[in-house]
Amino acid sequence: MSDPTSPWQQARRAARMNPSVIREILKVTERPGIISFAGGLPSSKTFPVAEFEAACAKVLKDDPAGALQYAASEGYGPLRESVAQMLPWNVDPAQVLITTGSQQGLDLVAKVLIDADSKILVESPTYLGAVMAFIPMEPQVVSVASDEHGVVIDDLAQKAPDARFLYVLPNFQNPTGRTMSENRRAAVSALASQRGLPLIEDNPYGDLWFDAPPPAPLTARNPDGCIYLGSFSKVLAPGLRLGFVVAPKAVYPKLLQAKQAADLHSPGFNQRMVAEVMKDGFLDRHVPTIRALYKSQRDAMLDALSHHFPQAQSQPEQSLTWNTPAGGMFLWARLPQGMRAVDLLPHAVNKGVAFVPGAPFYADHGDERTLRLSFVTPSVEEIHRGVAALAAAIKEQQVA
C-alpha cells in the first residue's frame, strides 16, 4: 500500500509487482546445514573456469577497446552467428537478439505483446518467473490444463480464441521436469498455426537431456509463428547473465527497440568471452559432462525415493509419488492425501531438508500437495540424507 503522505505516486502496474512467493518461502531454508532440494541453480561444479580465464585474457589482448566500449543493441555479431548455427532449424543471425539472461527476453516479450487485459495462456503449472515478467503489463493469465505430455489440446483449443500467445517450456519444464511428447508438439504446432496463436517457446534446459535428445522445438515447425528463448546460464554459467531471443521479422524490430530502452545492450565483454569459449565446438565437449553429472544425481534421488517410499506404486494416495524427468534439473512430487506442502516445509526444515512447495507455480487453482525437488546441487550422499529426512517429516505429519 502506498504512503498517502509521500510525494511519490506509483504506477498502477507497480501494485501488481510483488516479491517472488518462492523466494519468500525459501527464507526459512537459509539456516546453516540445510540440505536444499529447493534451489534452481545449476551446479557450480559445471562452470568452465579455466576456459573463461583463457577467454578473458584473449579478449582483452585482441581488442580491449572494443570489448570495454558500448556495443550494438542486437548483440555481438560472432555470438549471434554461433547461436544461429547451433539451433536445429534454419536461423538467420539477423533474427537473433542477445539478452541479459533469458529472463530479460520474457520481459521484452511482455512489453511488446501484452496490453492491459490481454489474455495470455500458460501451462499448468508454469515457470513462476515468466508470470512475474508478464504481470506488470496487467494481462489476464489463463492456465491451460496440462498432463505428463504437455498442454492438453482440447483445453488449448477452447481457450485459444483472442489469446495473445501461449507460453510453454517443452523441455524438462520448470517446475515439473516433464517433456512435451512428439505427438503433443505436432498437435500444439498445428492448432496454433490454424488458429493464428503465437507461441513463446522457452528452452533454458533443452541441452540437459540424459539418454536421448528431446523432440524438435516448436519453433522449428513454424518459425514465423514462434518466439524462441534460450540461455547460456545452464550450459556455461548464470553469472554471465546472457541469453538470446530468436524472433520472426514481424516482431524483431519492436523487441530490439524495447531492448534498447531497457539497457542499451547486454554486456559486450561477456558476449565476447562466451563467443571465444564456444569456438571449436567446446559446448559439444562440455555439455555431456553436465548431463552425466545431473543424470547420476537424478538417479540417486530416484533410488532414495524408491527406498523410503516403497508404497508409491501400490498406495499412491498414502505415499509421496513422483515423476522421472528425462533431463533438466527438477523432479515433481505429490504428497499423500490430506497434506499441504507449505505446511510440511517448516517440519522438513527442522529435519534438515528444504524443498519448494508447488502451489505458487500455478497461475490459478494450485495443487497444494505438489512440491519441486532439485537434484543438481546436493551431492549423492546429501541426496540420500535429504530424502531420508523428508520421509521422516512426512511420516510424522501423517501420524499427527
Image (cartoon, rainbow, N blue to C red):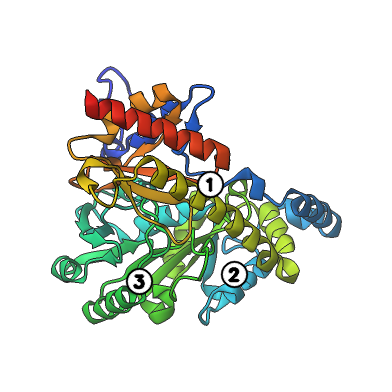
Q: Nearer the viewer, residue 333 or 11?
A: 333
The answer to whether residue 147 is above or below residue 294 is: below
- The kind of secondary structure element at disc 2 is helix
Q: Earlier in the sequence, mark 3 or mark 1?
A: 3
User: Which of pointers 1 and 2 indicates the residue nearer the eye?
Assistant: 1
Split into 4 quadrants, where in the image is the N terminus? top left
- Could you give the CA–CA distance between mark 3 and mark 1, rounded to whole angstroms? 24 Å
The amino acid on which the numbered mark 2 sits, given as a three-letter code, is Val
Q: Is residue 338 depicted above or below 399 in this figure?
A: below
Residue 135 x, y percent position in the rendering: 29, 47
Q: Where is 260 relative to 386, above or below?
A: below
Q: Report which quarter residue 171 is drawn in.
A: bottom left
Distance from disc 1 to disc 2, alpha carbons, whole Å, reads 25 Å
Q: Nearer the viewer, residue 136 or 386?
A: 386
The three-letter code of the residue at mark 1 reads: Val
Query: In which quadrant of the rendered view does residue 239 lie?
Result: top right
Which residue is identified by label 1?
376
- Tell me if I can see residue 70 in this picture: no
List the residue tagged with mark 2.
83
Q: CA distance from mark 2 to mark 3?
A: 25 Å
> Residue drawn at (58%, 49%), measured in percent from left and top?
241
